[in-house]
Image (tube, rainbow, N blue to C red):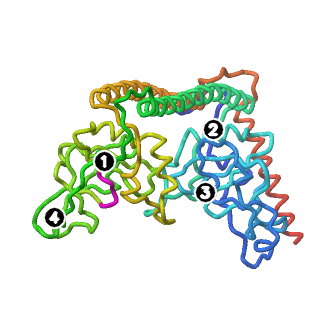
Amino acid sequence: MSQQELELPQGWVEIKLNDIAIRLQAGGTPSTRQSAYYQNGTIPFVKIDDITNSDTKYLETTKVKITKQGLDDSSAWLVPENSLLYSMYASYGLPIINKIKVATSQAIIVYQQPQDLISLDFVYYFLKFMGPFSTTKGTTQKNLNAGIVKNYKVLLPPLNEQKRIVSKIEEIFSKIDSAKLSLEYTKLQLEQYRQSLLKSAFEGKHTEQWESVKLESITEKIENTNPKDNPDHKFKYCDIASIDNTNHIIVNPKNFLGKDAPSRARQIIHQEDVIFSTVRTYLHNFAIVPSELNNQLCSTGFCVLRGTDSIITKLIFYLVQTIQFENYLNPLQRGTSYPAVRNNDILNYKFLLPALKEQEQIVSQIEQGFSLIENTTQIIESTLQKLQTMKMSVLKQAFEGKLVPQDPNDEPASVLLERIKSTKESQNTKQRGMKNVK
């Protein structure tokens, strides 16, 4: 007996996935000669895109289209109920369980277990734990084939232990998912608090010193230039792709010589300018210009907001983050492919401007609140990551035989394997007999 066999939990065996499969092969689009494939389809036709949701255990057949490419029962390529589907593309690498009769494309591997001899949920969680298969073929798009999957090694426990493992996994996962849901709700509340801070800052208690103004009246006119006039001059260029629209910072400015300048590289930006993308304003592509980009260039796709002495730059930065500002701009967007607003639309935005001393207080209050939100959000994100790691730890324990106790009264997996072999041989004999009759 090998060392590896000695390390197996009591009653377990190491086998290949094909050893516990009644059917394990790639799906296949029916022949174009089958009229049922083109007309009066009644069976959902599953494609790769339908099984790529890693958080879904079961195929959401309500989202699978039944089109003229649907199938009826005359098709030779129907996947039976209670099968496991797996994408051949290793970049997805996660299984999904199908509860009803479907057909699949050639890019999906179908696993069908021996009924009442193997827990399909156990195989599902095992493949989920293993993740993308390490052995793949292909260069541009790494992918699997049925032959690779058939030879994948599985540690198989007794059937009753398979069921206990699945039950325990789902019990723990349910608690983890509940905690994740609670944390996601807290994140939503933090975002609502963030907007509440901004709303309060610009619509809070007003003093007589607050004045109704347009952005145009408290911002400077921006100087344009043509960098091609100085062909050998090096400059940094910020376009929309340079914006991190989550943290609202410029992360990837590009370097150009004047002679190679993009046609939109026209606007001179200064330190502390606020640049706001006029294209798809709901994507929130805006940022404050850092010192290293002082006197560099940005795209004409930005509205550059440079405050006068009557406003603190940070206040403009927070103003454009308000839901009121977004709601003002959304209906003003023009175009279908690249919906955008004009600079004048932004500059015509009217708001109440406090005195400079109050502006300083408001900015300080916003930043204190935002700091608290950011710190709390980081804790939540870290906890969410730990919960995901905890799931993998649970699966690791499960497939090392450490999650639930072994029961010496369970039928050993070696005996179970013999029963599976017998079932497969019986089925193969039956299928050969049916072919001979034909």
Residue identifier under label 2: 125
- In the rendered image, the quadrant that contains the N terminus is top right
* Foreground pick, 115 / 206: 206
Q: Which residue is mark 3?
A: 49
* Left or right: 283 as drawn, with respect to 12: left
Provide the residue designation for mark 4.
257
Marks 4 & 2, CB-CB < 8 Å contact = no
The amino acid type of the residue labelled 3 equals Asp
Query: Would you say residue 1 is visible in this rendering?
Result: no
- Report crowding for label 4: few under 14, some 14 to 19, many 20 or more residues within 10 A (C-alpha): some
Name the element at disc 3.
Answer: helix
Q: Which residues, given as a range, are shown in magenta?
A: 300-304
Tag nearer the camera, 1 or 2 = 1
x, y percent for residue 256: 19, 62
Query: Label 2 is placed on what type of residue?
Result: Tyr
Quarter of image, res 37:
bottom right
The secondary element bearing badge 2 is classed as helix
First in sequence: mark 4 vs mark 3? 3
Does label 1 or label 4 sit earlier along the sequence? 1
Query: Within 10 Å of the Cα at label 2, are there few (<14), some (14-19), or many (20+) other Cα atoms?
Result: many
**Residue 73: percent from left, percent from top:** 84, 64
Label 1: which residue? 217
> Of the residues shown, which amino acid type is indicated by label 4?
Leu
